[in-house]
Amino acid sequence: MENRVPTRLSLGLLLRLVHQHWTQDVEAALEEAGFGDIRPPHANVFTFARPEGIQVSELTRLAHVRKQTMTQAVEELERLGYVERRPDPNDRRARLVFLTERGKGVRPVAMATGRLVDQRWSDMAGSQEIEGIKQALQALLEKLRSGDGNAAEPIDGAGT
Amino acid sequence: MENRVPTRLSLGLLLRLVHQHWTQDVEAALEEAGFGDIRPPHANVFTFARPEGIQVSELTRLAHVRKQTMTQAVEELERLGYVERRPDPNDRRARLVFLTERGKGVRPVAMATGRLVDQRWSDMAGSQEIEGIKQALQALLEKLRSGDGNAAEPIDGAGT
DNA sequence: TCATAATAGTCAGGTACCTGTCTATATCCA
DNA sequence: TGGATATAGACAGGTACCTGACTATTATGA
């Protein structure tokens, strides 16, 4: 089947391939846990939701995604009955996102999936290896951000 | 502006953020070189094109992208006048992609952009650091591929 | 205190990937 | 040699991000 990883892949390609694996694994973990209707971008909502409610803009900042992306995730979860939105009493521009009872039930599982995948990868490749990659990427990211002009706003991202 | 990278980002998020930086930098490098109409996914076509022509399917394999993605890149480059397609004399199902004269002129630049970005990142963060990340990711990828059932086909990817 | 700037959220549209299905042709081996 | 299987490419449709432009509301500071 000739499926060896060719010797020298570009950094861009490597990042993409590994990221794709990650996304697939998160999705699979959610599926396994019986939540096939929740997909990776939704997980952030569960991760950052708070009993007092939270604005979409704040979710956006916490998860490093654009408003549009987060709005869509919230809308889908609303349709699925996991969250609901109510007007923010302190800011008439805003609406607050709350977990429904159903949503509260899912929360621990959704929050855990990222960690679960981390765990599996650590078991597979060694936790030092994974930890090393994380630290190296984080350090790189900080350098990239200070090094160029784009250092300004929440660039994007999600738990995925 | 409060833009420190928060202390512990998930691996998925890190991969995504760094990959995004990479793509932006490649795009910027192409723009700088005066080829604003060529975007990252196109670069593969220049990288792997051959004087005798090449099939889209083979480009697909080399670049680790799906047929659809590569087809689209080739179509765009055809519209822009960088490549042309002619029937494959040895396989009536297939068409071969050739660089036009114009395409041949761009080739070196398009091929160099990936390396250029690597170079810049190495200057910024240290070439050992970058090299280490590449090797770690590559090793991880190999483990991931042998570890799960997905180890079969060209997963995806591109010079980006 | 009032014009200006910032923020919450919506709307419209784009990109780079993905999946699955389908036809024509090629290859294989029983 | 012919029937199952694989491959080249086209077509239709989906996802998770992105951007920019816009309205309503809030915060700022001169």
Image: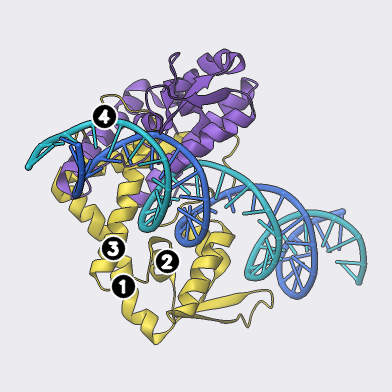
Chain colours: A yellow, B purple, C cyan, D blue
Q: Amino acid at mark 4?
A: Gln
Residue placed most toward the observer, A20 or A148: A20
- Please check whether the numbered discs 4 and 1 fall on a single chain: no
Q: Amino acid at mark 1?
A: Phe
Q: CA distance from mark 4 to mark 2?
A: 32 Å
- Please tell me whether mark 2 sits on a helix, a strand or a loop: helix
Q: Earlier in the sequence, mark 2 or mark 3?
A: 2
User: Would you call the spot at circle 3 few (<14 residues within 10 Å), some (14-19), or many (20 or more)?
Assistant: many
Q: Residue at x 33, y 28 (%)?
A: A9
Q: CA distance from mark 1 to mark 3?
A: 11 Å
Q: Earlier in the sequence, mark 1 or mark 2?
A: 1
| Residue B119 figure quarter | top left
Letter of the chain that mark 1 sits on in the rendering:
A
Letter of the chain that mark 4 sits on in the rendering:
B
Q: Earlier in the sequence, mark 1 or mark 3?
A: 1
Q: CA distance from mark 1 to mark 2?
A: 11 Å
| Mark sitting on residue B135 | 4
The residue that mark 2 highlights is: A42
The residue that mark 3 highlights is: A113
Q: Position of residue B65 (x, y in %)?
A: 39, 38
Q: CA distance from mark 4 to mark 3?
A: 26 Å
Residue placed most toward the observer, A134 or A12: A12
| Residue C15 figure quarter | top right
| Camera-side mark, 1 or 2 | 1
| Camera-side mark, 1 or 3 | 1
